[in-house]
């Protein structure tokens, strides 16, 4: 009887220890887009600039997580850093559509409540990710588009800017090149800047809650109000505390058709796969077999991280409460 009692007490202590350990751990993963990036295009100076900005975004998110802040706040903080940088195809660095305008999309999801918000085709909100969060928190809807989304954002007091704020000379030169030589090659993955640079973040906070968010300017020269996977919950963004949080980047049409972000979580929940197994199945097999280029970042409820991509590079990085961190582009 005493042996059984001791075993029971030991079991309770071990369970409590594991719970406290889980509550005290966090992880943040970010991406700045994937593509067939050549090392010739990536000069040492350019690479250093990208790595520095990714590190800055990680630091902004971690500053929230390590003080007990929420995963939702962390992913927004990280993405805002990337949206404010002309290096990435989101916010300030967004590409131009066929008419020479910047149209921005973003989405966010709370893994604890499964609430989500998204905006698409907006032109004058400084940080689209903040608009997506407002849709989630202060409206009965999941996605708002165009003028309606902008009007809602104004009512919510978000910072509005003149569309000229998003102008970037390098992106404009890229757009002009697109118009001069509008060939299948320039519309495809062989030209790295056409759709490279979508940004995303996923996080696990100390309370064990997951969150995911994604922001993009879409594709250079996009027409007819095209919307990719980034603002679509389940395709480019998904979070569920029962499995993982996912943010995608790449050829959006393929991610939409295959509901990639949700399928990774579904394989974990219903097929018992690990995060790495589910992520690799989608990115390295399913997408690749169909000719869909891109990658994802993900974190599960244990803090495991996955960052697979089937292109030559993906701007990415992560940081954990253990002190483990990494920021890279190739390999």
Image: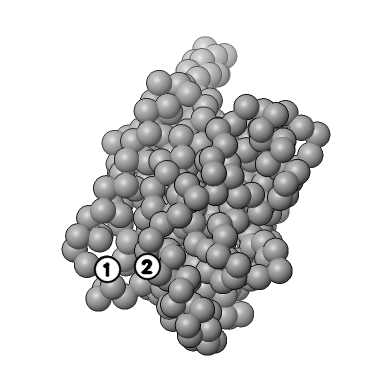
| Residue 100 image offset from top left, x and y in percent | 55, 65
Residue 143 vertical position relative to residue 121 in the rendered view, above or below: above
Residue drawn at the location 25% of the way across and 76% of the way down: 40
Q: Is residue 327 left or right of residue 31?
A: left
Residue occupied by mark 1: 42
Residue located farthest toward the right when viewing the structure as drawn: 140
Asked if marks 1 and 2 touch (Cβ < 8 Å), the reply is yes
- The quarter of the picture where residue 227 lies is bottom right
Q: What numbered label is drawn on residue 313? A: 2
Select label 1 or label 2 by which is in front: 1
Q: Which of these two is toward me, 251 or 240?
A: 251
Q: Is residue 165 left or right of residue 135?
A: left
| Residue 199 image offset from top left, x and y in percent | 48, 52
Badge 1, how many Cα within 10 Å: few under 14, some, many 20+?
Answer: few
Q: Which of these two is toward me, 150 or 72?
A: 150
Residue drawn at the location 47% of the way across and 83% of the way down: 180
Q: Quadrant of the N terminus?
A: top right
Residue located farthest toward the left when viewing the structure as drawn: 44
């Amino acid at each position: 009887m005493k042996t059984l009692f001791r075993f029971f007490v030991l079991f309770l202590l071990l369970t409590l220890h594991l719970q406290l350990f889980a509550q005290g751990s966090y992880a943040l993963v970010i991406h700045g887009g994937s593509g067939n990036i050549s090392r010739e295009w990536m000069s040492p100076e350019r690479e250093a600039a990208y790595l520095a900005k990714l590190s800055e975004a990680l630091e902004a998110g971690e500053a929230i997580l390590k003080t007990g802040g929420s995963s939702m706040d962390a992913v927004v903080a990280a993405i805002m850093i990337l949206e404010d940088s002309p290096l990435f195809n989101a916010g300030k660095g967004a590409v131009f559509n066929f008419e020479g305008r910047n149209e921005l999309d973003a989405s966010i999801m709370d893994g604890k409540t499964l609430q989500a918000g998204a905006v698409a085709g907006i032109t004058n909100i400084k940080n689209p990710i903040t608009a997506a969060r407002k849709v989630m928190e202060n409206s009965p809807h999941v996605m708002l588009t165009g003028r309606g989304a902008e009007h809602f954002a104004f009512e919510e007091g978000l910072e509005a800017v003149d569309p000229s704020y998003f102008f970037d000379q390098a992106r404009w030169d890229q757009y002009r090149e697109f118009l001069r030589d509008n060939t299948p090659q320039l519309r495809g993955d062989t030209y790295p800047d056409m759709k490279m640079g979508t940004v995303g973040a996923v996080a696990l906070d100390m309370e064990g809650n997951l969150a995911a968010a994604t922001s993009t300017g879409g594709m250079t020269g996009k027409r007819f109000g095209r919307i990719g996977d980034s603002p679509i919950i389940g395709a480019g963004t998904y979070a569920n505390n029962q499995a993982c949080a996912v943010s995608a980047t790449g050829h959006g049409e393929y991610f939409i058709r295959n509901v990639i972000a949700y399928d990774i979580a579904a394989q974990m929940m219903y097929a018992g796969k690990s995060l790495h197994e589910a992520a690799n199945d989608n990115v390295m097999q399913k997408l690749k077999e169909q000719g869909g280029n891109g990658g994802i970042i993900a974190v599960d409820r244990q803090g495991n991280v996955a960052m697979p991509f089937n292109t030559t590079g993906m701007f990415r990085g992560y940081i954990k409460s253990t002190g483990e961190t990494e920021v890279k582009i190739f390999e």
